[in-house]
């Protein structure tokens, strides 16, 4: 029997964003399998929160661990993208790397901790969201793709370093219906995510 621990943010803890008759990611997982699931993921949590509040609660009997974090860290940089000051391309890239550096360090520390137990660890990338047309996010919809790509490079690189599997959410959340709002998974998107998680556990 698999015991799957779910860590991270609202990509997993999306219950508040689905309708009363709809299912969250964890509820989809429970409906589609007989495995046990421990939800440690909390809506709004960042990499700092995962380090401070989630790792210590990880059950020792976990056979599999799924991590989805970093998206809220990127949201914390949204006003950097909205900054209207003029910078050279070189300055923008340098500032982006600098802003991601502490997030990268925390992310790698999380994965290092998780990889010290059993080897069954799945890292989720950050998706791009349904930002086009939104009154707040639309002006950074395309620029944000660059920041997401830079962070996801960290995810893939970290996964390779610690021999963890990586799930590319940009290939799963591909239509507006996958989102309950510009940045949260819907019932439909959550079902697609849960299917991929279960396929990973089963193999």
Image (spheres, helix red, strand yellow):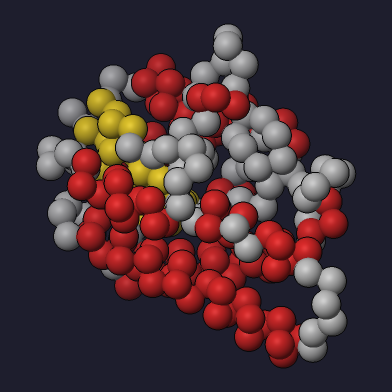
Q: Residue at x 65, y 42 (%)?
A: 183
Quarter the N terminus occupies: top left
Q: Position of residue 33 (x, y in %)?
A: 34, 22
Q: Residue at x 49, y 56 (%)?
A: 70
Residue closest to the eye, 25 or 198 = 25
- As displayed, is residue 200 above or below residue 160? above
Q: Is residue 104 visible?
A: yes
Residue closest to the eye, 166 or 77 = 77
Q: Residue furthest left?
A: 60
Q: Residue at x 52, y 19 (%)?
A: 23
Q: Position of residue 137 (x, y in %)?
A: 78, 50
Q: Residue furthest top?
A: 21
Q: Position of residue 66 (x, y in %)?
A: 35, 45
Residue closest to the eye, 16 or 167 = 16
- As displayed, is residue 80 above or below residue 122? below
Q: Is residue 163 visible?
A: no
Displayed quadrant of residue 21: top right
Quarter the C terminus occupies: top left
Displayed quadrant of residue 180: top right
Q: Residue at x 22, y 41 (%)?
A: 57
Q: Is residue 183 left or right of residue 14?
A: right
Q: Is residue 94 left or right of residue 193?
A: right
Q: Position of residue 199 (x, y in %)?
A: 40, 38
């Amino acid at each position: 029997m698999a015991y799957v621990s779910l860590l991270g943010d609202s990509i997993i803890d999306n219950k508040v964003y689905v309708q009363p008759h709809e299912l969250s990611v964890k509820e989809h997982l429970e409906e589609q399998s007989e495995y046990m699931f421990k939800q440690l993921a909390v809506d709004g949590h960042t990499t700092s929160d995962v380090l401070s509040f989630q790792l210590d609660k990880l059950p020792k009997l976990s056979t599999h661990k799924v991590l989805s974090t970093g998206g809220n860290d990127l949201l914390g940089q949204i006003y950097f993208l909205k900054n209207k000051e003029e910078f050279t391309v070189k300055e923008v890239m340098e500032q982006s790397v600098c802003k991601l550096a502490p997030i990268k360090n925390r992310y790698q520390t999380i994965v290092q901790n998780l990889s010290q137990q059993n080897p069954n660890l799945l890292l989720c990338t950050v998706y791009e969201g349904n930002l086009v047309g939104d009154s707040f996010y639309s002006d950074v919809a395309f620029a944000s793709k660059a920041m997401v790509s830079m962070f996801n490079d960290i995810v893939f690189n970290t996964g390779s370093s610690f021999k963890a599997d990586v799930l590319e959410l940009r290939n799963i959340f591909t239509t507006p219906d996958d989102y309950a709002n510009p940045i949260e998974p819907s019932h439909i998107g959550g079902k697609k995510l849960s299917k991929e998680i279960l396929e990973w556990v089963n193999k």
